[in-house]
Image (tube, rainbow, N blue to C red):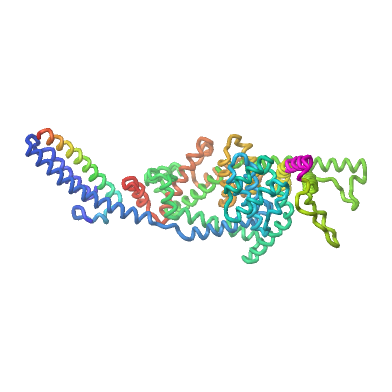
Amino acid sequence: MEVKGIKLSEIEHTELLELHKQVSDFIKFLDGEYENIKKMEAERL
Amino acid sequence: MSKLLKSIEKKIEIDKEIINVLPKTGIKQIKDLKKKIETMLDKYNKMDASIIKEMNRRYDNITSIKENPEIAVVKKQILEWNNLGLSDDAQNAFEKMGLDKLLYNLNGYYKKDLGTINKDIIRCVKKFKEVGIQLTKKDFNISEYVSEYMSVLLEEASKGVTNSEIIKNAFEKVYWKCSDLIPHIIVNIRQIYDKHEEEIELFYKNKTEKILSELNLTKEQLEAKKQELVEKLDSLVNLDGRNILDSFFNNTYSVSDYKRENYDKTYEKIISKNPDELTKEEKADMDINISDLHNNLVEYVNYLEFKFLIDEILKLREEKLKEVAKEQEEKANANKKDKKGKKDKNGKNTQKSEYETLKLEIKTLFDDIEKINGTHVEEKPKFGFFKKKEEQIINKNDPAKILERDKKILSIKDLYAKIDICRQKEVIFANVNDTSKLLDLLRLASYNYGFLARTIIKQYPDIIENDIHSMIERIRKFVRLYNFSVINNINMLEKKDISIVIKDKYKLLGMALTKENFSEAGIDELIKDIQLIKSYNDIVRSNILLEDIQYVINAKEILKR
């Protein structure tokens, strides 16, 4: 498994945990944005 | 921050910016942005799935660590030797069989359910079987109630059942005729033990001799070997990755404490300088000292917790010494009055100790009961035959006799309670002398379950039954399995403050310890600090990495494992 050309199996534990944090936090952000945009779309239609 | 993290962080920033700057006024723009977010979500979810997969792979890999198989082998060996009770001369067969615990439990029958009581009765029967005495219903003949109930219980137990409807019905039937059924059974079991006591003592003696001869060791050598194994087990467990990891899983240790900066800070607190200032050799020596101090502190704290038992032993010894002095004085006075004194036909002084008197009283009462029951057997004549009378209970239709017998059974139960206390004093008197160490006293206290339970209740009057049991287990485990170096060397009569003895030793070895560290307010913190340094060192020397432990504990929550 690679992310940005770097094998996940080769990174340190702390990096992996931090990576997960960054990505999962951003997914939460995207989920929030997606809900907002869906509402906006519904209002316009 | 690593290259990867920086790169992802940058990518996330860009994607965030795209979402922020894209126009969202018209419906087409909104749809475009929605599509964009969906694409991003898909991309990041896939990335997250890869990360989670890798996290799970590492988690499984680290947590699959197995306990060193040598630990189980050493544990088994220690337990086997412990169960033999080879070096415990002061422990009698009654205690070695475990009847002390079972009968203590039965004595509290009114707090338990019938199923538990039946199990304990059957356990008693099994204990006799283990020492070569097969009990049958004929042995339970102290009263017709016991005979009736035990016939059913033994029959059912032979089928592996101890709480069937048949047993419950039998209990119901007998109980209303005699609500003292369980005390009757208790007295009956004690009578059986008394009858076979010599035989059982011989069983243990022979077993001990056989094992020692097989091992080609003396009792002392075996005890020394056991101590070596205890030390070995301690070391194996402390350096075992599986056990270390479990200590984090069960919250004995916390990952937030086990950080290098915390270790250095704590070390500095104990030795008043940064550990980096020590040479490699000095650090290695100090680590050993800290490990020893940890062992001493745990021993000291346990000693403080169980000191009330030592105090009770010393109190009983004091009482016994006074009783003996009084008896001797009385004997001397009697001899002065009448030079011959009270002597038997062989010229021996017939004055009996309290223990002997109680034993005789019990025997007399049992004889009376057997006469009423018609089960009395005359002493075997040296020559010729002796005839056992019919075993069936012949006075069952004489209510006055039955009442008299039942009173005697309950009297015996009370006498056994007295003789147990009396025997404890006799054992203390015989085994404790002015050279005894604190550990000798604690060991002596640990042998008899009834004594332990009584003394614990005296110390903690509100304690509940389960806590008594778990405390006794802890005391026995401590006495049998601890790697002692303090209380096994301190004489029971020394008035030394053990904390000062420990403090002084480690001050000499360069630790910045004060009296306050050992005060009630300070000891917990000291132990916590020493434990942290010791465990940290153990982890470094073990087959698991601290980084792996920290990862597993952090990942556990995320992965919901």
Residue B207 in the image, given as x and y percentages of width and height: 66, 61
Is residue B367 at all visible to an observer of this figure? yes
Residue in the picture at 24% in, 52% down: B50
Residue B400 inside the magenta-drawn segment: yes
Residue B71 in the image, given as x and y percentages of width and height: 49, 58
Q: Is residue B439 left or right of residue B343?
A: left
Observer-nearest residue: B547 or B188?
B188
Residue in the picture at 85% in, 58% down: B381
- From the image, give the main secondary structure of the stretch colored magenta: helix
Observer-nearest residue: B150 or B289?
B150
Q: How many marks?
A: 0
Q: Is residue B437 left or right of residue B514?
A: right
Q: Is residue B377 left or right of residue B133?
A: right
The quadrant in which residue B409 appears is top right
Q: Is residue A40 left or right of residue B355?
A: left
Residue in the picture at 58% in, 44% down: B469
Q: Which residue reaches farthest top?
A: A43
Is residue B433 at all visible to an observer of this figure? no
> The magenta stretch spans which residues?
B396-412
Q: Is residue B212 above or below residue A26?
A: below
Residue B449 inside the magenta-drawn segment: no
Q: Is residue B454 above or below residue B544?
A: above
Residue B11 in the image, given as x and y percentages of width and height: 16, 46
Residue B408 in the image, given as x and y percentages of width and height: 76, 42
